[in-house]
Amino acid sequence: MNQLRADGFDVRDEDIARLSPFVRHHINVLGRYSFQLPDLSGGLRPLRDKHATDDE
């Protein structure tokens, strides 16, 4: 925020208080999301048997 203020932008303290520390670079101006998923070795896990109980 200091850099924005140094560049002459009006940065209000009440606006800064509402900023989130989470990264938002995966959201573009069109509202589309992009994620880079890690390469998981071994592929997908098998699906759960729908007839199995939770204890199995």
Image (cartoon, helix red, strand yellow):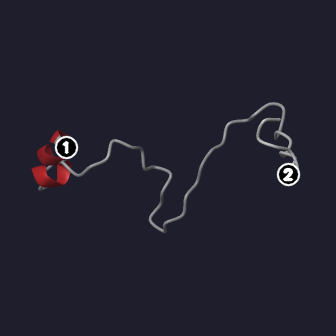
Q: Evaluate whether residue 31 shows in this view.
A: yes
Q: Nearer the viewer, residue 31 or 6?
A: 31
Mark drawn on residue 50: 2
Disc 1 marks a residue whose amino acid type is Met
- Position of residue 14 measured from the top left corner of the image (x, y, whole percent): 13, 53
| Residue occupying the point 42% across, 44% down | 23
Q: Is residue 51 left or right of residue 34?
A: right
Disc 2 marks a residue whose amino acid type is Lys
Choose the circle earlier in sequence order: 2 or 1. 1
Q: Label 2, secondary structure: give it.
A: loop
Q: Nearer the viewer, residue 45 or 5?
A: 45
Mark drawn on residue 1: 1
Q: Label 1, secondary structure: give it.
A: loop
- Establish if 24 lies above or below 28: above
Q: Nearer the viewer, residue 35 or 3?
A: 35
Q: Residues within 10 Å of mark 2 (few under 14, many from 20)?
A: few
